[in-house]
Image: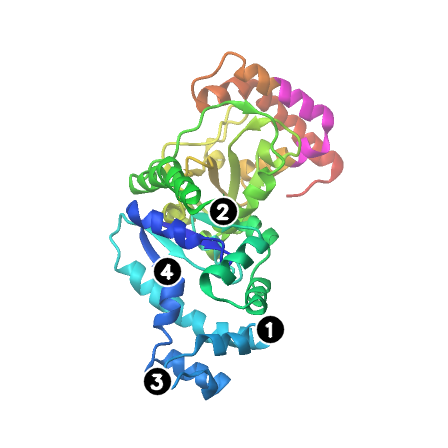
Amino acid sequence: MLRIGLSGGIGAGKSTVSSTFNELGGIVVDGDVIAREVVEPGTEGLAALVEAFGSEILLPDGALNRPALAAIAFPDDEKRKTLNGIVHPLVGTRRAELIEAAPSDAVIVEDIPLLVESQMASLFPLVVIVHADPEVRLRRLIEHRGFSEADARARIAAQASEEQRRAVADVWLDNSGSAEDLSAAARELWHERIAPFARNVRESTPARSLPKLVTADPTWPDQAARILARLRTACGHHAIRVDHIGSTAVPGLDAKDVIDVQVTVASLDVADELADALLAAGYPRVDGVTDDVAHTDDTSVWRKRLHASGDPGRPTNVHLRVDGWPNQRFALLFRDWLIAEADVRAEYLSVKRASTAEGPETTDDYAEAKEPWLADAYVRAGGWADATGWRP
């Protein structure tokens, strides 16, 4: 099963995206639909709302008067928190029931209006945000949904900002054009990324990536931050620490477009216990992998577990290493050494360029080509750590 988090500001057009995904085979779990369901007449949700906001939020037939509730709750931060505190847990319970009933190989599209505000982004292997400028959304709400301008502006202001949404978005779908344009973009996303991602998770197969050196991307740290949050959620208390490592963690250093992350655990047994949780988060295990041990005779302390992303749109390696073992320590040391020493960065970049000059066919070929330099770097970095007092 692959869970996709879908969100966007009110009036942004995410209903068009969810409808398109549904047509393509996704099972849409719509937060708005569930939110209505849990406050229907006779439910504990509606009773709680009446207790909190009074009977004036009811229509003559006993149903919820949504505009009346909105007029009370949305302009007031505390009242909005009260509203969310009543409705969100009920929605979460119902959502879990629907997901539990879905087939094990399904793609679940969870349409959640307040995904960002509820801090739920890290629960999903992929987060898709639909965006339109506030004035465009304002016009749509007034013209197509009958909102007053004041109500529309209050709804928009009460939701997450563009900056907050961008921070959690793995995919940013712009809806400044037509509904047809948005639907076409959603279809392309499904066929090029979501469907292959779901297949890779189902088959427990990482997405393939080529050992191609690219210019340093200033957004790598932001992309890594989303991955770190996802892995912290997936691993929970089993992870002692989760760190962005490797070349993409070094500002300005050209690298393969692969995010490397290290999850530090207490033992390899703990790492093995995390396999199912990591697969559910989108990271299948890669079997038969260990760190290179050319510079040591003690191979036992260079063992690890490796998972890699099934998402073809964001290649990622997740290295699970034991706290205090040389390979765990060196991953952090090597990153910090490169950040601190410009001459070493330049030297390493030359090695990387030479290693890709003849186009290595696999990542293993690329790693093997760099190994002679890295074996020496292990000793040099250790000397730097001793001289500077570096600690992980």
- Residue 77: give its label: 1
Using the numbered discs, state the Cα–Cα distance from disc 1 to disc 4 in whole angstroms. 25 Å
- Residue 175: give its label: 2
- Residue 232: give its label: none
Q: Amino acid at mark 1?
A: Asp
Q: Amino acid at mark 3?
A: Asp
Which label's residue is closer to the chain start, 1 or 2? 1
Q: Position of residue 171 (x, y in %)?
A: 48, 44
Using the numbered discs, state the Cα–Cα distance from disc 4 to disc 3 in whole angstroms. 26 Å
Segment tinted magenta in the rendering: 336-350
Judge whether 1 appears above or below 379 on screen.
Answer: below
Which label's residue is closer to the chain start, 3 or 1? 3
Q: Are marks 4 and 3 in contact (CB under 8 Å)?
A: no
Q: Which residue is mark 4?
A: 30
Q: Which residue is mark 3?
A: 61
Using the numbered discs, state the Cα–Cα distance from disc 4 to disc 2 in whole angstroms. 19 Å
Using the numbered discs, state the Cα–Cα distance from disc 1 to disc 2 in whole angstroms. 28 Å
Between 29 and 279, the one lying in front of the other is 29
Q: Are marks 1 and 2 in contact (CB under 8 Å)?
A: no
Judge whether 370 appears above or below 309 on screen.
Answer: above
The residue under the point 64% across, 43% down is 392
The residue under the point 28% across, 47% down is 25
